Amino acid sequence: MFQAIIFDMDGLMVDTEPLYWEVARKLAQAHGTSVADNTLRRMMGRSRIDSMRIFASACRIDKPCPEDLLIEREKLMLERYARGVQPMPGLREILDRFHGRLKLAVATSSPRKFTDALLPALGVARYFDVIQTGDEITHGKPDPEIYLKAMSKLQIEPRSCIVLEDSHAGALSGHRAGAHVIAVPSYLTEHEDFSFADARARNLSETCGLIEAQLDRSA
């Protein structure tokens, strides 16, 4: 019996990935270099520091260190968020459909200061029982730690959780945690490998039907 849905945030709930790409290009330019689209794709879904290590290595930036680059990126991201963000299609629909029926949680590689800014701005903070952020874990996605911690806070076993993810690394994290994973790729991730996922949907509206079918089977 499924008892909870755990949502990724960036690229699934909020169309932030293009903003991350925009900021990464700006950051690379500030350090006298450029960043390839392939590098930006490899960074998606990873932990904050892992993504910046990939960035620094690919862009051949020796100084400042990845930790300092991360501080620069997050400052730029907060400035960009202040200009507005767009929710993914179907977000409000899926939250309204399952709120009160299942527990809802967020498990995002983003830091707490990002969820504190984005979820209220979208008017969806009230839907979630648990918010697990990337600055509160040791090992980032695709390691299962973030999902296992969210499940522990929900007090629900992994097999009773549905994980929604848009990236390969994030979906693999949920899979390794033992959850039922539904991949909901964005246009930036639609060509990634999701063969291990339990299901795949084109958007959050279609995901509603898949979850309803699972609930009917387990009833």
Image (cartoon, helix red, strand yellow):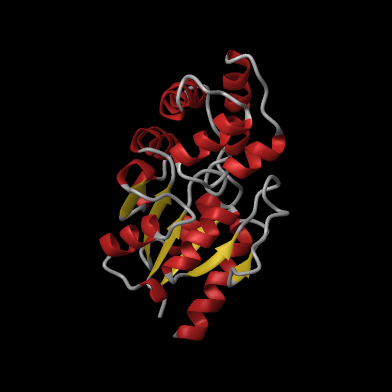
Q: Is residue 34 above or below residue 114?
A: above
Q: Is residue 71 above or below residue 139?
A: above
Seen in the image, is 83 located left or right of residue 206?
Answer: left
Q: Is residue 187 above or below residue 51?
A: below
Q: Quadrant of the C terminus?
A: bottom left
Q: Please tell me which residue is depicted at 53% across the width and 70% down the height of the picture.
A: 211
Q: Position of residue 169 (x, y in %)?
A: 55, 54
Exactly how many numbered labels are in the figure? 0
Q: Position of residue 27 (x, y in %)?
A: 57, 20
Q: Quadrant of the N terminus?
A: bottom left
Instruction: Between residue 115 and residue 57, name the one nearer to us.
Output: 57
Q: Please tell me which residue is depicted at 51% across the width and 34% down the height of the picture.
A: 52
Instruction: Between residue 28 and residue 126, name the one nearer to us.
Output: 28
Instruction: Between residue 68 and residue 19, name the one nearer to us.
Output: 68
Q: Position of residue 58 (x, y in %)?
A: 63, 33
Residue that lies at the very extreme toward the right in this rendered image? 191
Seen in the image, is 200 located left or right of residue 136?
Answer: right
Q: Is residue 114 above or below residue 108?
A: above
Q: Position of residue 15 (x, y in %)?
A: 58, 40
Q: Quadrant of residue 178?
A: bottom left
Q: Please tell me which residue is depicted at 48% across the width and 60% down the height of the picture.
A: 173
Q: Please tell me which residue is depicted at 43% across the width and 47% down the height of the picture.
A: 108
Instruction: Between residue 16 and residue 86, name the one nearer to us.
Output: 16
